[in-house]
Image (cartoon, grey):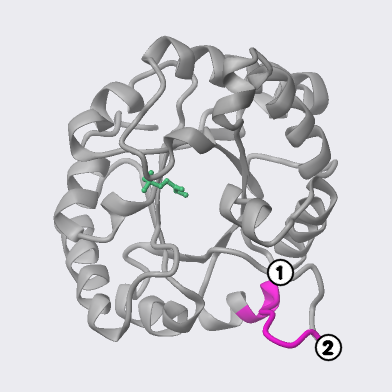
Amino acid sequence: MPLKPLIAGNWKMNGDTASLGEIEAISEVVSASPPRADILICPPATLIFQAAQTAAGRIAIGGQNCSAEPCGAFTGDVSAEMLRDAGATAVIVGHSERRRFHGETDSMVAAKTLAAWRAGLLAIVCVGETEGERLAGDHQTVCKTQLRGSVPDRAKAGNTAIAYEPVWAIGTGKTPALSDIASMHRHIRECLVERFGPEGNSIRILYGGSVKPENAREILFTPEVGGALVGGASLKAADFCAIFSAAPQGT
Ligand code: 13P
């Protein structure tokens, strides 16, 4: 049975305690008229505890990254268990900014996904091609390789979502043609079913990259799009609420 769409906001390295007002505003909209979509905000780690207190179960709160290790001498890192303890129920892993600026490889992302599962968090595993890879026609192969290397065995709809984020669409205002989103999501679906059997049909595949109120509806109604991972437009409650209000009504 397909899950509800998941509309997730990735605040990246933005936000301070004043931004908790946006969490409150989003939570109020969700509780006044519950969308038939799961709503998640991933603020910076410093805000997770307060964001979860503010949301008080009305929306879910997640991390943007985690260590593969549960604890120990890893200065500056935060474990999946710590995210969970702070009130997170999900974590983004393998975002292209982590792959690019922190040298994260597919096997590192797979280890982080296992850590997320170990802590009982939903892992949102990001894949996506660069502009050069798309121009070279390698986008499907690149994403298939990332999926194979980054998603461990035993992925299920309950512990994993995939986010397809073409690197060239992130923060640029550019989005792929809807037909290109549809064909990439279909390709990812085929990879998931080949690997995980029927369970692969239930794992949500989110689209990310310049999702805004203006294009949310057409993207969210594209076949095999099971939600969105929203960057810039998740920072303001009004924009983010407009995006999740455009989501199809899930079951
Ligand atoms: P933008 O929505 O700002 O393009 O960012 C997308 C993204 O990277 C979400 O993880």
Badge 2 local density, few (<14 within 10 Å), some, or many (20+)? few
Instruction: Establish if 108 lies above or below 165.
Output: below
Q: Are marks 1 and 2 in contact (CB under 8 Å)?
A: no
Q: Residue at x 54, y 65 (%)?
A: 89
The answer to which of marks 1 and 2 sits earlier in the sequence is: 2
Q: Is residue 79 magenta?
A: yes
Most common SS among magenta residues: loop
Which residue is denoted by mark 2 in the rendering? Answer: 72
* Residue 28 relative to residue 129: left or right: left
Q: Residue at x 31, y 65 (%)?
A: 58
Which quadrant holds the C terminus? top left
Q: Residue at x 58, y 20 (%)?
A: 134
Tell which tag, 1 or 2, sits nearer the viewer.
2
Would you identify the image quadrant in which residue 56 lies? bottom left
Q: Secondary structure at mark 2?
A: loop
What type is the residue that disc 2 sits on? Gly
Whether residue 86 is visible here, answered yes or no, is yes
Q: Secondary structure at mark 1?
A: loop
Range of residues picked out in magenta: 74-82
Pinpoint residue 217: horizontal percent, then vertical percent. 25, 27
Front residue (pair 147, 157) = 147
Q: Is residue 217 magenta?
A: no
Instruction: Establish if 115 lies above or below 70.
Output: above
Pinpoint residue 31: horizontal percent, then vertical percent. 21, 60
Q: Is mark 2 within 8 Å of ligand 1?
A: no
Q: Which mark is residue 119?
A: 1
What type is the residue that disc 1 sits on? Ala
